[in-house]
Image (spheres, helix red, strand yellow):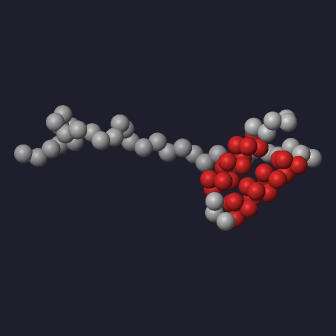
Amino acid sequence: MSADAGDVAVPRTYPSPPVFLPVREGQEARPVLDCAGCSWLDQERRDARNRGDHSTASDCSVRIRRHPTH
């Protein structure tokens, strides 16, 4: 007896096919001009990208978006 894809006795180990989200290029957080904190985070983000550390680059973008002084 073989298990077919529609066989109820075969448990599904995943809820559905994976969802592919588009890369949001062009929507990057922009640093505020003349803000030392934003300038530092922007430089840190560029350095992280140059070394392939995309997690830190993403964190910097979030911090720029949430910067408390603006």
Q: Quadrant of residue 7?
A: top left
Residue 27 is at least partly visible in this image: no
Q: For this view, does 34 lie left or right of residue 46?
A: right
Residue at the outermost left position: 1
At 11% across and 46% down in the image, what residue appears? Answer: 2
At 85% across and 51% down in the image, what residue appears? Answer: 39
- Residue nearest the viewer, comparing 23 with 57: 57
- Residue nearest the viewer, comparing 44 with 30: 44
Point out residue 32 in the picture as x, y percentages from the top left corner: 86, 43
Q: Quadrant of residue 17?
A: top left
Residue at the outermost bottom position: 51
Q: Relative to 48, does residue 65 appear above or below in the rendering?
A: above
- Residue nearest the viewer, comparing 11 with 3: 11
At 79% across and 39% down in the image, what residue appears? Answer: 67
Quadrant the N terminus occupies: top left
Residue at the outermost right position: 34
Point out residue 59 in the picture as x, y percentages from the top left corner: 67, 48
Point out residue 15 in the picture as x, y percentages from the top left corner: 35, 36
Q: For this view, does 68 lie left or right of residue 7?
A: right
Point out residue 37 in the picture as x, y percentages from the top left corner: 84, 47
Q: Quadrant of residue 52?
A: bottom right
At 37% across and 38% down in the image, what residue appears? Answer: 16
